[in-house]
Amino acid sequence: MSPHKTTESSKDAAAEYFEKNPSPKALNSHQALAREFIQYHAETSPDRRIVLVTSGGTTVPLENQTVRFIDNFSAGTRGATSAEYFLKQGYAVIFLHRQFSLLPYSRHYSHSTNCFLDFMDEHQDDEGGVVVRKEYQEKMRRVLEEYHYAKQNRLLLLLPFVTVTDYLFELRALATLMHPIGSRAMFYLAAAVSDFFIPRERMDEHKIQSRDNGADGETGGQGSGASRQLVINLDPVPKFLNTLVQSWAPKGSMIVSFKLETNPDLLVAKAEQALERYHHDVVIGNLLTTRKWEVVFITRDGGEHWVRVPKTRRSKSFSGIEKMIGLAERKHEQHPIDLEGGTVTEG
Ligand code: 9Z3
C-alpha cells in the first residue's frame, strides 16, 4: 500500500472512530480551559513553548455503565516526572493524565510506600500544630517552591481522562487548539495507549452477568446454566499517531512518541518502524522491565541513542529523565539535533 493510501485509510478510520464513539463529558470544559491557557501564554510571553505531556494508562470499559474494564499498567511516573523537567526548562505544560495517576510535584508524596502522614509529625508545643519531619524538610521545600512557581505563573494545566476513547478525543481537541503557537508546540506522548477497544455499538449497557439471564450482549458469555465463559471481542484502535502528525498538530510542531516493548529484540526495530510510518520527530523506546534506567532515542536522521543511568544512581523513577528531556528540548530548539555527549553513561 502506498504511504498516501495508508494516510487516507487511517484518517478515515480515525474519523469513523470519532463518529461512532461518545466524547468525554468533560471535553467542552477541558477545551475552554486549554484555549484560555494557550491564549494566556501566547499573549503574555510570545516566546513561551508549550508541551502537551500525556501520561498514565488508558482503560477499555467492558460495559457502558462500567463495572469492569481492561487497563494498562502505567502509573504515570514517566509523564509526571517529565512534566516537572519541562517546567524547569521554561515550558508551559498541559498535563493530560489518567485520573488518579501520578501528578507533577505531588508524585513525590503520593502512591509511595510511605503514606503522606509518614512525612508529618505533631509539633512538640502546646498549640497542637503539625510539621513536616526534619529529614524530609529540605526536599519538600524544594518541591514546594517549584510547585508554587508553576502555579503562580499558571504554567501547569492538569486535565484528566479515563478511557482510551476519552484520551483520543482530548488529544485531537488539544492538538487543534495548539495551532496558534505553531512550532512552539511539542507533543510528548508517554501515556500507555490501548491498542484494542470495544466499540460503543457492541458494548453492553449493564454489568455483564456471570449467569445466563437470557439477555446476552455482544461481549456476553457463552453457554448457559450455573456459570459461563466471557468471550471479549475487541477491535483495533485506529492508528491515531498518523492523523495527529498529518492533520491535528500544528505544522512544524515537535512530536515525540514512546514505544513500549517487553522483548528486547523488537524494541529498536519497532521504534524505527513507528518513525518511518508516522513521519514524526522522535520515538523514545523503552522496555517494561528496564524502563526506569534506560531508554533509546530514535531520530529521523537514523540516530539510535541510549540514555542509561548507572546502577549506583538508579532510583524509583528514571533519574536520567533530565538528560532525556534535555535531548527532546534541544531537538525542539534546533534542527537537526546534535546528540553528541547526551548520554548519562554508556554500558
Ligand atoms: C511508554 O512507553 C511510557 O514510557 C511508559 C511509562 C508507559 C512505559 P510509567 O508510567 O511507564 O512510568 O510506569 N508509553 C507507551 C506509549 C504508547 O502506548 N505508545 C503507543 C504506540 O507506540 C501510542 S503513541 O503505539
Image: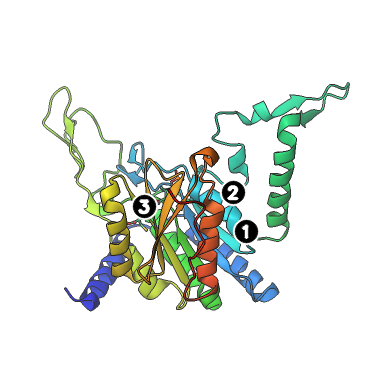
What residue is shown with label 1?
87
Q: Based on the displayed image, in which of its 4 quarters is residue 207 positioned?
A: top left
Under tag 1, what secondary structure?
helix
Looking at this view, is 18 or 285 the one in front?
A: 285
Residue 281, compared with residue 56, is above or below; it is below
x%, y% of residue 234? Answer: 22, 48
x%, y% of residue 25? Answer: 46, 54
Question: At 65% across and 76% down in the image, what residue appears?
Answer: 46
Circle 1: residue type: Leu
Whether the residue carrying mark 3 lies under 8 Å from ligand 1 is answered with yes
Residue 20, compared with residue 315, is above or below; it is below
Q: Give the residue furthest to the front.
A: 347
Q: CA distance from mark 2 to mark 1?
A: 10 Å
The answer, for residue 197, to whether it is visible in the render is no
Proximity of marks 2 and 3: CB atoms separated by less than 8 Å = no
Q: CA distance from mark 2 to mark 3?
A: 20 Å
Question: At 38% across and 66% down in the image, what residue appears?
Answer: 303
Under tag 3, what secondary structure?
loop
